[in-house]
Image (tube, rainbow, N blue to C red):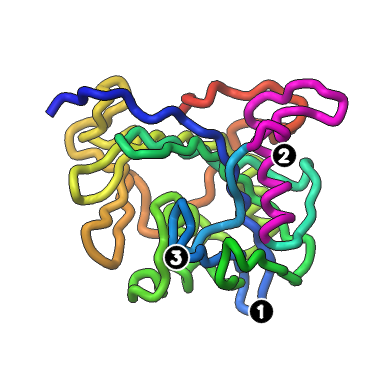
Amino acid sequence: MKRTSALAPLEDACTVVLLRDGNAGLETLMLERTQTSRAFSGAWVFPGGKVDLADRLAPDGTVLHDCAAATAAGLRELAEETGQRLEPGDLVWLSQWTPLQDIPRRFQTWFMVAAAASTQVVINPLEHLGHLWISPAQALARHARGELKLIPPTWVTLHHLTTMDSTAQALTAAKAAVPFSYRTHLLGSDGVMWSGDEAYPDTTEAGDPGARHRLVTRELPWIFQRSGETERPRPVPARRPWINLQQEPLPPPGSHR
């Protein structure tokens, strides 16, 4: 059926994937949203939130570019939601998520990754019910058993972190990689897909017949499929220097690799 109405406008947001080295290896901080949350109620998420108008201005009044504004929002939300305080230079741009579905609110979300400032977490009880330091593999296993509610961007991020053994390794890989722009389309009722999949609606970005770049969510466990990728994906090879989130020009939000 042809769409008869325009998509909801995009709102900018930022998510911070906070990492630490636990006794069993790499761990990430996850927060449980309340059942009354306007967005992702009941889900386990990384810290983060919407970019406010104040986040778009530097201390001297200069208007920040979108990624720097997202960084400011991520740092503010991280402090408000967890008590963890970091600096802009501590964050590394990991990915960007843009939903292209017809949904009431659409958030264009920058995912940043950073090392935790400490092991102490103080949550805001108005927004979250609890928190976990958990390995990516354990989080996915608990989701597969129906114990944790996740959303696709969180699931895919955890999936790729399963290849990392330490915070240092994860940050090094993120600094070396080109942030991927996940422009998400629905795969009918089966899940979601991205550029490179044979069924991707934009033919300029669709893959060859049989190509896969999708997350199948019709039942547990969810299954990530990407042509040419093993079950446990390898770290992304180096492709460009680390972006300084405050000063350097950025690729357009819709750029892909």
Q: What is the spatial separation of the Cα atoms under label 2 and label 1, in whole angstroms?
A: 31 Å
Residue for point 16% across, 24% down = 2
Q: Which residues are magenta?
A: 52-81
**Mark 1 and mark 2 in contact (Cβ < 8 Å)?**
no
* Residue 165 rendering spot, x and y as whole percentages: 60, 65
Q: Which numbered disc, 3 or 1, marks the residue closer to the eye? A: 3
Tally of numbered tags: 3
| Residue holding disc 1 | 23
| Residue holding disc 2 | 72
* Residue 109 rendering spot, x and y as whole percentages: 53, 39
Of the numbered discs 3 and 2, the one sitting upstream in the chain is 3
**226, 190: nearer the viewer:** 190
- Let me know if residue 190 appears in the view: yes
**175, 40: nearer the viewer:** 40
User: Is 54 placed above or below 60 here?
Assistant: below
- Let me know if residue 68 appears in the view: no
Task: Give the farthest residue toward the right.
Answer: 60
Of the numbered discs 2 and 1, the one sitting upstream in the chain is 1
- Dominant secondary structure, magenta: helix
Q: Which mark is residue 249?
A: none
208 part of magenta stretch? no
Residue for point 22% across, 31% down = 208
| Residue holding disc 3 | 35
Task: Give the farthest residue toward the left.
Answer: 1
Q: What is the spatial separation of the Cα atoms under label 3 and label 1, in whole angstroms?
A: 32 Å
Residue 242 placement, left or right of 149: right
Question: Of the residues shown, which amino acid type is indicated by label 3?
Answer: Gln
User: Is 34 placed above or below 215 here?
Assistant: below
Residue 99 placement, left or right of 115: left
